Amino acid sequence: MFTPAVLRQNAKNFMKGPTARKAWALSRHGRALQPRGRRDRMHVALFNAAFEEVGGPDQYPECELEPGSAL
């Protein structure tokens, strides 16, 4: 069983690679709009937090959307 702490560490480890950060930057807005269960929403939130912690939005500003433009 994965605890939130283990999932958080997995997300941080995933975001260490530049390819992973770019892939998350390109797909995170679409993922936020998809209907998901509680556990899936938690995974997306943890990956978003790890992405922002490593400075992802600053590294890939061209992938960031204005609020509401993803709709």
Image (spheres, grey):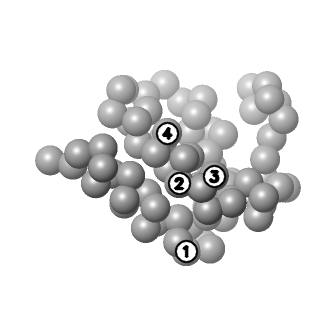
47 vs 14: above or below = above
Residue found at the far left of this picture: 1
Q: Write the residue at 28% across / 54% down.
A: 6
Q: Amino acid at mark 1?
A: Gly
User: Which of the marked residues, 1 or 4, is nearer the chain's N terminus?
Assistant: 1
Disc 3 target residue:
52
Q: Identify the secondary structure beneath mark 3.
A: helix
Q: Secondary structure at mark 2?
A: helix
- The reply to whether callout 2 and callout 4 are in contact (CB within 8 Å) is no
* Residue type pointed to by label 4: Ala
Q: Is residue 43 above or below residue 52?
A: above
Q: Mark 2 near mark 3, Cβ–Cβ under 8 Å?
A: yes
Mark 1 or mark 3, which is nearer the start of the sequence?
1
Q: Position of residue 2 (x, y in %)?
A: 21, 49
Residue at x 54% of width, y 30% of height: 34
The mark closer to the camera, 3 or 1, is 3
- The Cα atoms of the two marked residues, 4 and 3, are separated by 11 Å
Would you call the spot at circle 1 few (<14 residues within 10 Å), some (14-19), or many (20 or more)?
few
Q: Which residue is mark 1?
A: 17
Q: Amino acid at mark 2?
A: Ala
Mark seen at residue 61: none
Mark 2 neighbour class, 10 Å CA radius: few under 14, some 14 to 19, many 20 or more: many
Residue corresponding to mark 4: 45
- Of the residues under marks 4 and 3, which one precedes in the sequence? 4
Depth-wise, is mark 1 or mark 2 nearer the camera? 2
The residues tagged by marks 1 and 4 sit, at their Cα atoms, a distance apart of 19 Å
